[in-house]
Image (tube, coloured by chain):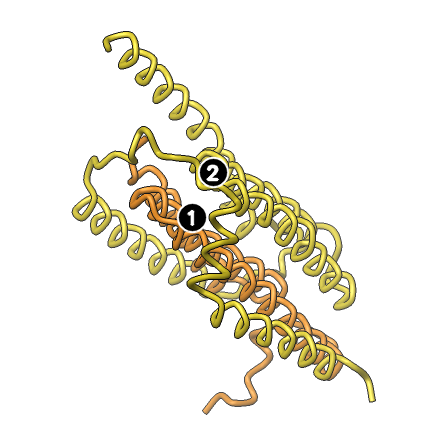
Chain colours: A orange, B yellow
Amino acid sequence: MHLNAFLLLAAFLFCTGVYGALARKNAVLVLMSIELILNAVNINLVAFGAFHQSIVGHIFALFVVAIAAAEVGVGLAIVLLIYRNRHSIDLSEVDLMKG
Amino acid sequence: MAAAAAANADLNTMGYLVFGVIATAMAVSAVRVVTTKNVVHAALYLVVVLAGVAALYVQLAAEFIAVVQVLVYIGAIVVLLLFGTMLTRAPIGRTSDLDNDQRIASAVVSLFLLGVLGWALGDAFGWQHLPADGSVQRTADVGNSIFQDFVIPFEVISILLLAALVGAVVIARRD
């Protein structure tokens, strides 16, 4: 197998996630796009671990999974708070800090 | 020797066949996650992408991470996202109100990023192969490595998870 097969697929997933994070205005869908981005990074870490015959890539991928779980927990709590205060999770309406 | 090489080539073709099927399913589902007009469908397409990632981990001989991927992502994070969908009364069913008005600009940005990344990866790694006789990374090795070389990051990350979950409860509770 070529290393670049995995890396290019991960790059495609990453760019899809970037598109979703920029173009979606439902907050839950933005969180899903961020999950796509994190998974793309994880594929890269594991592929490089296999390429260099090293276990460290796996360890870092595990740490990224733990961070992703923490991120989605806090993110959904914030989304719930926004919903409770504004009765909408439309991110284009959350512009309190817009200059 | 020739027979071993032929068997190796067969294995390689087989690997590419499996990879192609998984990668196609993942790419289509990932595009559907960011374009579908239905929040619940987006979560279900996300499950396909995450399962595809787990399959790629198996193909890369990282079986422990594949199991963790299924448990944590498909088992916990997608369920959490569906709970979020439910609690925020997101429109269940088709709706045209999920995208903002910068879709074109976002598509340009992400296609540009894809071009840059593709060029950089092709330039840096070209046609390099993964080691064909790659030894399977055993789960025991993962455990040994975490508890020998990465003990402090492991403890830090457990504190981080605890803090994040307590923080989530504090942020989301009614008082």
Left or right, B115 with reference to A14? left
Q: Residue A68: x, y in percent?
A: 55, 63
Q: Is residue B20 above or below residue A81?
A: above
Depth check, front residue: B69 or A98: B69
- The answer to which image quadrant residue A99 occupies is bottom left
The single residue placed furthest to the right in the displayed view is B175
Residue type at tag 1: Ile
State the image coordinates of residue A20 (x, y, percent, origin top left): 49, 58
Do callouts 1 and 2 mark residues in contact (Cβ within 8 Å)? yes
Q: Count neighbours of disc 1 (C-alpha within 10 A) and say few if under 14, some if 14 to 19, many if 20 or more.
A: many
Instruction: State the residue at coordinates (63%, 56%).
Output: B96
From the viewer's side, name the closer residue of A12 and B129.
B129
Q: In x, y percent, where is residue A85?
A: 73, 84
Left or right: A9, with B167 as reference point: left
Q: Label 2 marks which chain's residue?
A: B
Question: Mark 1 highlights which residue?
Answer: A43
Mark 2, Cα crowd under 10 Å, few <14 / some 14-19 / many 20+, is many
Tell me if residue A53 comes above or below residue A94 in the rendering. Answer: above
Residue name at image x 49 percent, y 67 percent: B151
- The circle on residue B147 is none
Q: Amino acid at mark 2?
A: Leu
Point out residue B9 in the picture as x, y percentages from the top left corner: 30, 17
Q: Which residue is mark 2?
A: B56
Q: Chain of mark 1?
A: A
